[in-house]
Amino acid sequence: MNSALPSLVPIPPVDAEVKQICCEYCPVACGYKVLMWPVGSQGGTTAADNALSVDLPTSPLSGRWVSENMHTVVDIKGVATNVIIMPDYETEAVNLGGTHSVRGGALAQKLYRADGPTSDRFKTPLLKVNGDHVPISWEMATDLVAALSTYTIETWDELAWGVKIYSYQFYENVFAASKLGLGMIGTPNYSPHHAPAEGDDVPGLSDCGIDAFGSSFADDKEADVIFISGSDPYETKTVRFTTWQVAGGAKIIYVDPRRTFTANYAENNGGIHLQIKPGTDVVLYSALVKYIIDQGWQDTEFIDANIASTDEVAAEGKWRRARFGRSFDGLRADLDAQPAFELDRASEITGVPVEKLIRAAELMTGGGFDRPKTMVLFEKGVYWSHNYENTAAIGNLGLVLGATGRPGRATGRMGGHQRGGQKAAGYPKDKSPHFFETPEQKVEMDTERWLYEGNTRFRWIIGTNWIGAMGASQDMRRRVNELISIGDPVDTVEYERTLAQLKGRMDQGGTVIVHQEAYANGSTGVADIILPAATWGEDDFTRNNAERRLRLYEKIMDPPGDAKPDWQIFAAVAKKMGFEGFDWKDTNEIFEEAAPKSAGGRRNFEELVKKAQADGMRGHDLLKTYGTTGIQTPIKNEGGELVGTERLHTDLKFKTDSKKANFVFPDWESVDERNAILKPLDGQVWVLNGRVNALWNNLSDNVRRELSTERWPANFLEVSPEDAQAWGVESGDLLSITSENVLSPVGERVTGSFSAVAYVSDIVPPGVTFSYMNFPGSEANAITSADTSLQPLNLRNNFKLGAGTVEKIGTTDLKETMSFAPRNLAP
């Protein structure tokens, strides 16, 4: 609760302005209503006298109850305005009946208030002068960015000009950024916030021919069995779990080294928890596949009709699929050739008892009786450990079950973010300096290694705590500080001298950094120039959720001060660099320009824009008519009516040259070798990381929200009771987590550490701990590897496989103020 607000929420009057928006956070993207009216007026308690159309008071479970966290007072064009952001109780999709997560239920607290906790927004461009950030004009800021960009490209080449940017943001911002970076400049030095390199996060699944976001939430409810690995849906996709998965009554097979709420729920409700040892996913999935095939429980009808032959796989045009793709017979031969996939040996490696492996296989297949409808779902715990091999092996599991393209039967991601990555141009992989084994086998550039080696002269950071989000974060921060300290510091706000000093640093091998953000974060300190950005609710935007549902996110208020939407900033710089095609008047013009670029993909919304233009409407305005229900892409026009796509692969055609799916080589040997490098040394334990319910990502909103800071005032480390006893640790003690075995981006062993508060819990087994992924000032990535040479097929960090030594360094008063109650009690 915001103490500056009254204890009771005012009642919105009948004439309150109503807008639509969706949640900012998880990939479920619940729909919300925005109610706005001037302070000093309110409605009445009868349904006819308020904008909620309900007699008040009403039940908290009615869908029309407004909590204090759903209300705020903001300045809109000089008028003190009440704003309520509440779940849309009228939506026909996603959060049916007005349900919501604890994160979304506090969206109103995200809005800017000059007298509130969000008052520290960036409001004007800043330049670092003698170590301090001081205000400058937009004219000077964009002149500097454009001039330094041009100088970088002309003096070196486009590979020296880099972008680190959100991958999940809104269509309009991502399109504008990629039009400049990938389209006009054509740099391969372009990567998303969550990875050192651009490219597919689930390449093994893609090599199977399966789209990672092919299913709908309705499939969760339709399924009889849901296999979930590497994601805790209760914690991170709450409404999908409660409204679609639990409500459907499916038996859940839950794979996780931790015994979480979801794990206990699964076992208490006819499902099973496979408590796997970290890093052994390939063995688990492949042992299940082998056992299913050995018992004759595979979906033979699906396999015979839809799996490519050996010759068809060999004829594939993409080298990786042609090399690692397998027919059904090829997969069987691979499985039989690896002893690790025999049940007894697999049980030893994974830690999962044989009887549980057999039970999981029976649940997914029916064990020779009626075949259930089975979903295979996964997320970052799978592809942020052993990327290619894990996503291939879980794809094999989905295919052997025939889990694709039909109601209640799908294989794919649960999603980490909402899906706004509609680009204006493709990635120029041919320019990347990195490859697998030969120069013909190009992979996307490892932009972190490239910068670490001193090859990036200019880097533009957009919407991310870049350093904290990468592996070996402490060592990366050290190296970045070296690169920005080369040459003389900027000592003036005079344009020509500033430009000359920054060019001088670049000439001597240093790096200039621009940070475009709403708030300061752990990467802001290294920035030479800060560009204040607008955010959610401060312009009209669009994006998809994890079931490809496209909605309009309406503008609520202007950004504070002189902050601007990202697309406007990109356009201003592009025009100063001499590029054409950036004269957009608003986000709708970008949306309509992006439509043809979406054609042929899962985001295809071209028909919506065509129909809007034919009907004399703006694309945004037509999309708005679909409300928070939205429409699922790809969008088709059937007889003049727009029709969404509930699920992909319904024709059982796949993303391969043959249009058939294929299995992929289950490579345990490579994973086993990698585990030997990453595993805990003597005296160390696994240090896993992830999200928890009340927080999101780098906490840019949560640290300004009392609801979150009261629950999580500090980062935590879950410690098993057995380890706690051995270490002499109690909940609330202050711990140091250290590793001298962290691999830098160039493969050197470096030291990393972070501190956290002990949270003693049976959620984790002995030898395994768990912390929040990117808590400000306490980055779990300080002890995760940044060496992408460990995963040469797809250059990714092993974010989920940290290891370190845990030491008690003191006590805290949090023992008296922070709850350490069990977090995994489930019905």
Image: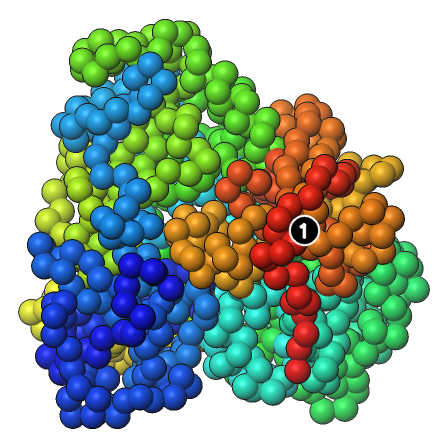
The x, y position of residue 763, in whole percent, is: 73, 63
Left or right of 687? Residue 569 is left
**Colour logic:** rainbow
Relative to 163, residue 358 above or below: below
Asked if residue 577 shows in the view, the reply is no
Residue 217 x/y as whole percent: 48, 77
Residue plotted at (63% across, 84% down)? 250
Query: In the image, is residue 181 above or below residue 607?
Result: above
Q: Quadrant of residue 706?
A: bottom left
Question: Which residue lies at the image location 40% right of the left edge and 56% below the top edge?
Answer: 705
Question: How would you rate the neighbour count of disc 1 (Cα within 10 Å): few for under 14, some for 14-19, many for 20 or more?
Answer: many
- Quadrant of the drawing holding the C terminus: bottom right
Q: Pick the residue in front: 513 or 348.
A: 513
- Label 1: element kind: loop
**Based on the displayed image, in which of its 4 quarters is residue 4 positioned?**
bottom left
- Image quarter where the N terminus lies is bottom left
Q: Is residue 61 visible?
A: yes
In the current view of this chain or complex, which residue is farthest to the right? Answer: 344
Relative side of 17 to 435, left or right: left
Residue 772, horizontal then vertical, whole percent: 59, 50
**Residue 461 horizontal side relative to residue 551, left or right:** right
- Horizontal side of 365 relative to 114 (left or right) equals right
Q: Is residue 160 above or below residue 170?
A: above
Q: How many marks?
A: 1
Which residue position is annotated with label 1? 732
The amino acid on which the numbered mark 1 sits, given as a three-letter code, is Gly
Tell me which corner region of the image, top left, top right, bottom left or bottom right, holds residue 390: bottom right
Residue 91 lies, in percent from the top left, at: 32, 81
In the image, what residue occupies the spot 16% across and 82% down?
Answer: 43
Judging depth in this view, the residue of 498 and 224 nearest the camera is: 498
